Image (cartoon, helix red, strand yellow):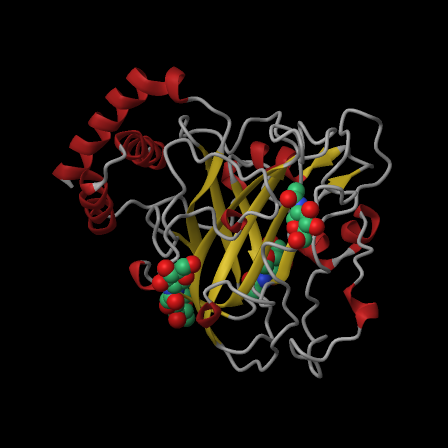
Amino acid sequence: MKGKSASSKLGFALLLSSLAPLASGHTYLTSLGINGTQLAEEKCIRPWWKNENYPVEDPNSSDLLCRTKDMTASATSMCGVTAGSNITIYWTESGTGSRAIDPSHLGPCLAYMAPLSSNGSGDVWFKIYEDGYDPATKLWCVDKIVKSKGYLDITIPADIAPGDYLLRTEIIALHEADRVYGADKSAGAQYYPNCAQLTISGTGTAQPRGYAIPGIYKPTDPGIHINIYDPMHSYTIPGPPKYVPGSAKNTNANIVSAASISNTQTVGASAKSSSSATLPIPTSPTAISVAPPVVNTGPSQTTAKKCSHRKSVRKCKHQRKARFHFEL
Ligand SMILES: *[C@@H]1O[C@H](CO)[C@@H](O)[C@H](O)[C@H]1NC(C)=O
Ligand SMILES: *[C@@H]1O[C@H](CO)[C@@H](O)[C@H](O)[C@H]1NC(C)=O
Ligand SMILES: *[C@@H]1O[C@H](CO)[C@@H](O)[C@H](O)[C@H]1NC(C)=O
Ligand SMILES: *[C@@H]1O[C@H](CO)[C@@H](O)[C@H](O)[C@H]1NC(C)=O
C-alpha cells in the first residue's frame, strides 16, 4: 500500500501540472464494473487509441471497430460475466480524469457484442444497448453519463450462448452533426468506440444476427446527420435494431429476412423498452450499482508497470490521474 500512496501523490502532482493542456473533451472506456466490483483500468479492455483518444469521424474507417491499432486479442485479458447480469461501463474524458466527456458532446450511448473468434470481422455485431434522446426530459444519454460521472449500467443478454465475446461500447457525439461527413472531413458525428473482452457463462444458446462494423452507420443516417440545436421531437438511434433476448431462437447470421433488417427505432420506442425502464442510469455517483471503486495494489502495480513501458507519457498521466480519481 506504500506504493499506492506514492503513486497517488505522483498522480496528484501530474493532475495539477497537466490538467489544462490535456483537456480535449474526448472520452474512452476506462474500466468495467463486474460482480459489484470496479475492475482495474484497462483490465480486459483493448488498448486505447492514442494520447487524446480522438474520435473516429469516418464511419467507413476500420477504426470504427474498436478505436485501437491493436486488434490482437491475445494481448488483452478476459473478464468473466454470467449471461443476464448487469455490468457497468465507466468512461473518462481524456485529460481530466474527473468527467465522462465534454458536456457539449451530446448524443446516444450504444453497446454491441460479437464472438471473440471473429476478431470483429464480418456480420458479427449485435446491439445489446442503446439510449438516445428523450424529448420529454430533453435529456441525451450523454447528459445522463455526464451527471453520473461516466457510469452506465448495461445488461448482458441472458440467452446468448456461453463463450468468449468482444463487447464494443460507444458514444456518438452529435455537436457538429448538422453537416454531413464527406467532402468536409471535419464535419459530422464523432464516434467514440472501445472494446473489451468477456467470457460469458450460462446455459443460453442464442446466436443473435450480426452486422458488420464498419457498415452500421452512414453519414446521412437520420441519427447521424442531425442538428441537435433545433427543437427535437424524436430521435432515431443509429445502427441495427437492438437484440431482444428470446428473439434469436430460430435465427442465425445467415437466415434473416430483409424485412427484419430495417431499423425503425425511435426514442419513443426506446423509452418504453425494458432497457430504459429497468436500467435507470445512476443520477449520482452514490447510486452506482457497483461498489465504490477499489484500487488494490496488484492491478495498480500492473497498470503502473505497463504504463512505464509505454511510449505515451501523456497516456500514463491519464492513468495516474484516473487512479487518483478512484482513490478519492
Ligand atoms: C485480429 O485482426 C488483426 C488485424 O486486423 C490482427 O493483427 C490480429 O492478429 C487479429 N487477432 C486475432 C486473434 O485473430
Ligand atoms: C463474476 O462472477 C462470475 C460467477 O461467479 C465469475 O465466473 C466471473 O469470473 C466473475 N467476474 C469477475 C470479473 O470477477
Ligand atoms: C462508405 O462506403 C460506402 C460503401 O462502400 C460508400 O458508398 C460510401 O461512399 C462511403 N462513404 C464515405 C464517407 O466514404
Ligand atoms: C440489472 O439492473 C436493473 C436496474 O438497475 C435491475 O432492475 C435488474 O434487476 C438488474 N439485473 C440483475 C440480473 O442484477
Residue 305 vs residue 276: left or right?
A: left
The picture quadrant where one finds residue 172 is: top right
Give the residue drawn at x 64%, y 64%: 211
**Place of residue 273 in the rendered image (x, y in percent of width and height, measured from the top left):** 76, 57
Residue 239 vs residue 326: left or right?
A: right
**Place of residue 98 in the rendered image (x, y in percent of width and height, measured from the top left):** 43, 29
The answer, for residue 19, to whether it is visible in the render is yes
Q: Is residue 262 above or below residue 284?
A: below
187 and 11: which is toward the camera: 187
- In what quadrant does ligand 4 lie? bottom right
Q: How many marks?
A: 0
Residue 180 vs residue 80: left or right?
A: right
The answer, for residue 131, to whether it is visible in the render is no
Quadrant of the frame with the C terminus: top left
The picture quadrant where one finds residue 76 is: bottom left
63 and 229: which is toward the camera: 63
Quadrant of the frame with the N terminus: top left
Q: Is residue 147 above or below residue 42?
A: above
Give the residue drawn at x 50%, y 39%: 286
Give the residue drawn at x 69%, y 53%: 239
| Residue, far left | 2
**Place of residue 238 in the rendered image (x, y in percent of width and height, measured from the top left):** 72, 49
**Place of residue 125 in the rendered image (x, y in percent of width and height, measured from the top left):** 59, 63
121 and 74: which is toward the camera: 121
